[in-house]
Image: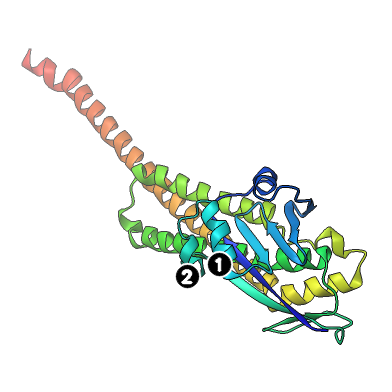
Protein backbone atom coordinates (compact mmCIF):
# COMPACT_ATOMS: atom_id res chain seq x y z
CA UNK A 1 0.00 0.00 0.00
CA UNK A 2 1.32 3.40 -0.96
CA UNK A 3 1.03 6.66 0.96
CA UNK A 4 2.46 10.13 0.55
CA UNK A 5 3.93 12.47 3.13
CA UNK A 6 5.03 16.06 2.61
CA UNK A 7 7.80 17.69 4.66
CA UNK A 8 7.85 21.51 4.78
CA UNK A 9 10.64 23.45 6.51
CA UNK A 10 10.01 27.13 7.22
CA UNK A 11 12.20 29.94 8.52
CA UNK A 12 10.80 31.63 11.64
CA UNK A 13 12.23 34.70 13.39
CA UNK A 14 11.86 33.15 16.84
CA UNK A 15 13.07 30.01 18.59
CA UNK A 16 10.29 27.68 19.71
CA UNK A 17 10.94 26.08 23.09
CA UNK A 18 9.80 22.76 24.48
CA UNK A 19 7.33 24.62 26.70
CA UNK A 20 5.84 26.37 23.66
CA UNK A 21 5.16 23.04 21.95
CA UNK A 22 3.74 21.41 25.08
CA UNK A 23 1.42 24.39 25.56
CA UNK A 24 0.29 24.27 21.92
CA UNK A 25 -0.15 20.47 21.89
CA UNK A 26 -1.08 19.22 25.39
CA UNK A 27 0.10 15.67 26.01
CA UNK A 28 2.68 15.85 23.23
CA UNK A 29 5.65 13.53 23.83
CA UNK A 30 8.86 15.12 22.56
CA UNK A 31 12.16 13.47 21.75
CA UNK A 32 15.47 15.23 21.18
CA UNK A 33 17.80 15.01 18.20
CA UNK A 34 20.83 17.27 17.77
CA UNK A 35 19.47 19.98 20.14
CA UNK A 36 16.14 19.90 18.30
CA UNK A 37 12.71 18.59 19.32
CA UNK A 38 10.39 16.30 17.39
CA UNK A 39 6.93 15.24 18.41
CA UNK A 40 4.13 13.22 16.83
CA UNK A 41 1.02 15.39 16.78
CA UNK A 42 -1.20 12.67 15.34
CA UNK A 43 -0.72 9.44 13.43
CA UNK A 44 2.21 10.03 11.00
CA UNK A 45 2.00 13.77 11.66
CA UNK A 46 5.17 15.26 13.13
CA UNK A 47 6.53 18.67 14.06
CA UNK A 48 10.27 19.35 14.29
CA UNK A 49 11.78 22.51 15.81
CA UNK A 50 15.41 23.60 15.80
CA UNK A 51 17.55 25.99 17.82
CA UNK A 52 18.43 27.99 14.68
CA UNK A 53 15.05 29.41 13.73
CA UNK A 54 13.59 26.71 11.46
CA UNK A 55 10.48 24.60 11.97
CA UNK A 56 9.57 21.54 9.90
CA UNK A 57 6.03 20.27 9.42
CA UNK A 58 5.41 16.67 8.40
CA UNK A 59 2.00 15.79 6.95
CA UNK A 60 0.53 19.25 7.66
CA UNK A 61 -1.66 20.95 5.09
CA UNK A 62 -0.71 24.47 3.99
CA UNK A 63 -3.70 25.85 5.91
CA UNK A 64 -2.58 24.04 9.07
CA UNK A 65 0.93 25.47 8.67
CA UNK A 66 -0.47 28.98 8.22
CA UNK A 67 -2.71 28.54 11.27
CA UNK A 68 0.21 27.39 13.43
CA UNK A 69 2.43 30.27 12.28
CA UNK A 70 -0.40 32.71 13.00
CA UNK A 71 -0.66 31.42 16.56
CA UNK A 72 3.07 32.05 16.88
CA UNK A 73 2.33 35.66 15.81
CA UNK A 74 4.49 35.35 12.68
CA UNK A 75 3.33 38.33 10.63
CA UNK A 76 4.19 36.63 7.32
CA UNK A 77 2.10 33.55 8.21
CA UNK A 78 -0.50 33.95 5.47
CA UNK A 79 2.10 34.20 2.71
CA UNK A 80 4.95 32.22 4.26
CA UNK A 81 5.60 30.46 0.95
CA UNK A 82 6.86 33.70 -0.61
CA UNK A 83 7.76 35.87 2.41
CA UNK A 84 9.80 33.35 4.39
CA UNK A 85 12.61 31.02 3.35
CA UNK A 86 11.11 27.56 3.03
CA UNK A 87 11.70 24.22 1.35
CA UNK A 88 9.57 21.14 0.93
CA UNK A 89 10.28 17.51 0.06
CA UNK A 90 7.62 14.87 -0.69
CA UNK A 91 8.01 11.29 0.50
CA UNK A 92 6.51 8.17 -1.06
CA UNK A 93 6.04 5.26 1.35
CA UNK A 94 5.89 2.02 -0.60
CA UNK A 95 6.80 -1.58 0.25
CA UNK A 96 8.77 -1.74 -3.02
CA UNK A 97 11.59 0.36 -1.50
CA UNK A 98 13.35 -1.80 1.05
CA UNK A 99 16.16 0.76 1.26
CA UNK A 100 15.83 4.54 1.11
CA UNK A 101 16.07 5.97 -2.39
CA UNK A 102 16.18 9.73 -2.95
CA UNK A 103 16.20 11.82 -6.09
CA UNK A 104 15.70 15.53 -6.65
CA UNK A 105 11.93 15.15 -6.47
CA UNK A 106 11.01 12.44 -3.97
CA UNK A 107 12.13 10.42 -0.95
CA UNK A 108 11.16 6.77 -1.43
CA UNK A 109 11.21 4.26 1.43
CA UNK A 110 9.08 1.51 2.89
CA UNK A 111 9.42 2.75 6.47
CA UNK A 112 8.03 5.77 8.23
CA UNK A 113 8.45 6.36 11.95
CA UNK A 114 9.82 8.87 14.43
CA UNK A 115 13.45 8.20 13.47
CA UNK A 116 12.84 8.52 9.73
CA UNK A 117 10.82 11.70 10.24
CA UNK A 118 13.62 13.07 12.46
CA UNK A 119 16.37 12.47 9.89
CA UNK A 120 14.41 13.98 7.00
CA UNK A 121 13.32 16.96 9.11
CA UNK A 122 16.86 17.56 10.34
CA UNK A 123 18.41 17.54 6.85
CA UNK A 124 15.68 19.78 5.44
CA UNK A 125 15.97 22.17 8.41
CA UNK A 126 19.74 22.34 7.91
CA UNK A 127 19.18 23.22 4.26
CA UNK A 128 16.82 26.08 5.15
CA UNK A 129 19.19 27.17 7.94
CA UNK A 130 22.03 27.30 5.43
CA UNK A 131 19.94 29.36 3.04
CA UNK A 132 19.23 31.83 5.84
CA UNK A 133 22.98 32.14 6.43
CA UNK A 134 23.68 32.37 2.69
CA UNK A 135 21.32 35.34 2.36
CA UNK A 136 22.78 36.98 5.46
CA UNK A 137 26.30 36.62 4.05
CA UNK A 138 25.19 38.06 0.70
CA UNK A 139 24.24 41.25 2.55
CA UNK A 140 27.59 41.29 4.34
CA UNK A 141 29.39 40.82 1.02
CA UNK A 142 27.61 43.93 -0.29
CA UNK A 143 28.64 45.82 2.86
CA UNK A 144 32.21 44.64 2.31
CA UNK A 145 32.12 45.92 -1.29
CA UNK A 146 30.97 49.34 -0.05
CA UNK A 147 33.92 49.42 2.35
CA UNK A 148 36.31 48.59 -0.49
CA UNK A 149 34.74 51.28 -2.67
CA UNK A 150 35.58 53.97 -0.13
CA UNK A 151 38.85 52.50 1.14
CA UNK A 152 40.89 55.47 -0.09
CA UNK A 153 38.73 57.84 1.95
CA UNK A 154 38.32 55.64 5.01
CA UNK A 155 39.11 57.39 8.30
CA UNK A 156 40.23 56.37 11.78
CA UNK A 157 36.74 57.24 13.03
CA UNK A 158 35.40 54.34 10.89
CA UNK A 159 37.18 51.83 13.13
CA UNK A 160 34.13 51.43 15.38
CA UNK A 161 31.91 50.43 12.44
CA UNK A 162 34.61 48.04 11.23
CA UNK A 163 34.78 46.37 14.63
CA UNK A 164 31.00 46.00 14.65
CA UNK A 165 31.12 44.47 11.15
CA UNK A 166 33.90 42.08 12.20
CA UNK A 167 31.90 41.09 15.28
CA UNK A 168 28.91 40.26 13.08
CA UNK A 169 31.04 37.99 10.92
CA UNK A 170 32.49 36.20 13.95
CA UNK A 171 29.00 35.71 15.38
CA UNK A 172 27.78 34.35 12.02
CA UNK A 173 30.55 31.75 11.94
CA UNK A 174 30.00 30.74 15.56
CA UNK A 175 26.28 30.23 15.02
CA UNK A 176 26.84 28.16 11.89
CA UNK A 177 29.26 25.83 13.66
CA UNK A 178 27.38 25.63 16.96
CA UNK A 179 23.80 25.47 15.70
CA UNK A 180 23.66 23.97 12.21
CA UNK A 181 26.01 21.15 13.29
CA UNK A 182 26.80 20.16 9.70
CA UNK A 183 30.23 18.71 10.41
CA UNK A 184 28.98 15.51 12.05
CA UNK A 185 26.28 13.00 11.27
CA UNK A 186 23.35 12.80 13.71
CA UNK A 187 23.98 10.37 16.55
CA UNK A 188 20.94 8.22 15.73
CA UNK A 189 22.40 7.11 12.37
CA UNK A 190 25.53 5.47 13.76
CA UNK A 191 23.83 2.16 14.60
CA UNK A 192 21.43 2.11 11.66
CA UNK A 193 22.87 1.75 8.16
CA UNK A 194 19.59 2.55 6.43
CA UNK A 195 19.09 5.76 8.45
CA UNK A 196 22.70 6.68 7.66
CA UNK A 197 22.04 6.08 3.96
CA UNK A 198 18.87 8.18 4.20
CA UNK A 199 20.76 11.11 5.76
CA UNK A 200 23.74 10.82 3.39
CA UNK A 201 21.51 10.80 0.31
CA UNK A 202 19.51 13.78 1.59
CA UNK A 203 22.69 15.69 2.43
CA UNK A 204 23.95 14.98 -1.11
CA UNK A 205 20.71 16.03 -2.82
CA UNK A 206 20.47 19.18 -0.71
CA UNK A 207 24.20 19.87 -1.30
CA UNK A 208 24.73 20.51 2.41
CA UNK A 209 28.49 19.92 2.38
CA UNK A 210 29.30 22.01 -0.70
CA UNK A 211 27.02 24.84 0.46
CA UNK A 212 28.60 24.77 3.89
CA UNK A 213 32.06 24.99 2.30
CA UNK A 214 30.88 27.98 0.23
CA UNK A 215 29.59 29.66 3.39
CA UNK A 216 32.93 28.97 5.10
CA UNK A 217 34.80 30.44 2.13
CA UNK A 218 32.66 33.60 2.18
CA UNK A 219 33.21 34.02 5.92
CA UNK A 220 36.97 33.61 5.45
CA UNK A 221 36.90 36.15 2.62
CA UNK A 222 34.94 38.62 4.74
CA UNK A 223 37.32 38.10 7.66
CA UNK A 224 40.33 38.79 5.43
CA UNK A 225 38.59 41.84 3.96
CA UNK A 226 37.92 43.31 7.38
CA UNK A 227 41.51 42.64 8.46
CA UNK A 228 42.84 44.35 5.31
CA UNK A 229 40.60 47.39 5.73
CA UNK A 230 41.36 47.57 9.45
CA UNK A 231 45.10 47.51 8.66
CA UNK A 232 44.48 50.34 6.19
CA UNK A 233 42.67 52.37 8.86
CA UNK A 234 45.44 51.67 11.36
CA UNK A 235 48.04 52.71 8.78
CA UNK A 236 46.22 55.99 8.12
CA UNK A 237 45.86 56.54 11.85
CA UNK A 238 49.60 55.94 12.31
CA UNK A 239 50.41 58.33 9.46
CA UNK A 240 48.17 60.96 11.04
CA UNK A 241 49.90 60.52 14.41
CA UNK A 242 53.29 60.71 12.73
CA UNK A 243 52.34 64.01 11.11
CA UNK A 244 51.12 65.34 14.48
CA UNK A 245 54.43 64.39 16.05
CA UNK A 246 56.34 66.05 13.17
CA UNK A 247 54.30 69.24 13.56
CA UNK A 248 54.77 69.21 17.33
CA UNK A 249 58.53 68.83 16.87
CA UNK A 250 58.49 71.64 14.30
CA UNK A 251 56.56 73.89 16.69
CA UNK A 252 58.95 73.00 19.50
CA UNK A 253 61.90 73.90 17.26
CA UNK A 254 60.26 77.23 16.38
CA UNK A 255 59.66 78.05 20.04
CA UNK A 256 63.21 77.02 20.92
CA UNK A 257 64.59 79.13 18.08
CA UNK A 258 62.55 82.09 19.23
CA UNK A 259 63.47 81.58 22.88
CA UNK A 260 67.24 81.19 22.42
CA UNK A 261 68.05 83.05 19.20
CA UNK A 262 65.43 85.58 18.13
CA UNK A 263 64.17 86.77 21.53
CA UNK A 264 67.65 87.68 22.98
CA UNK A 265 68.37 89.83 19.91
CA UNK A 266 65.32 91.97 20.66
CA UNK A 267 66.27 92.56 24.27
Looking at the image, tell me whether mark 1 or mark 2 is earlier in sequence order: 1
Q: Which of 155 and 96 is in front in this view?
A: 96
Q: Do the residues labelled 1 and 2 touch (CB within 8 Å)?
A: no
- Residue at position x 89%, y 82% in the image: 98
User: Which is more foreground, mark 1 or mark 2?
Assistant: 1
Q: Is residue 13 something one can see in this rendering? A: no
Q: How far apart are marks 1 and 2 (CA)?
A: 15 Å
Q: Position of residue 255 (x, y in %)?
A: 20, 23
Residue at x 30%, y 40% (from the top left corner): 243
Query: Residue 213, percent across and down?
Result: 65, 68
Q: Where is residue 24 in the image (x, y as percent from the top left)?
A: 64, 49
Residue at x 66%, y 45% (from the top left corner): 23
Q: Is residue 138 left or right of residue 114?
A: left
Q: Quadrant of the N terminus?
A: bottom right
Residue 116: % across, % down: 81, 68
List the residue tagged with mark 1: 63
Colouring mode (rainbow / by chain / secondary structure / one colour): rainbow
Q: Which of the 4 quarters of the picture holds residue 49?
A: bottom right
Disc 1 element: helix
- Residue position marked by numbered label 2 in the rendering: 82
Q: Which of 251 and 145 is in front in this view?
A: 145
Is the C terminus in the top left, top right, bottom left or bottom right quadrant?
Answer: top left
Q: In this view, does 236 lie to the left or right of 109?
A: left
* Mark 2: secondary structure: helix
User: Which one is in front, 109 or 230?
Assistant: 109
Give the vertical position of 238 relative to 76 (above or below). above
Relative to 249, is 112 above or below?
Answer: below
Amino acid sequence: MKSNVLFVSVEIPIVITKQDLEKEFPGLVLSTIEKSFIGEIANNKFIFTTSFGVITFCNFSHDEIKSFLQRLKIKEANNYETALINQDYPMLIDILYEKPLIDTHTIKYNKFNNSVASIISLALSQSVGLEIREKSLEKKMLESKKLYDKIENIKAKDRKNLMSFAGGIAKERFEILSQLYLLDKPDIVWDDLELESLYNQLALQLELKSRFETVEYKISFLKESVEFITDRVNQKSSEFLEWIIIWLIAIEILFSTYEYIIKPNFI
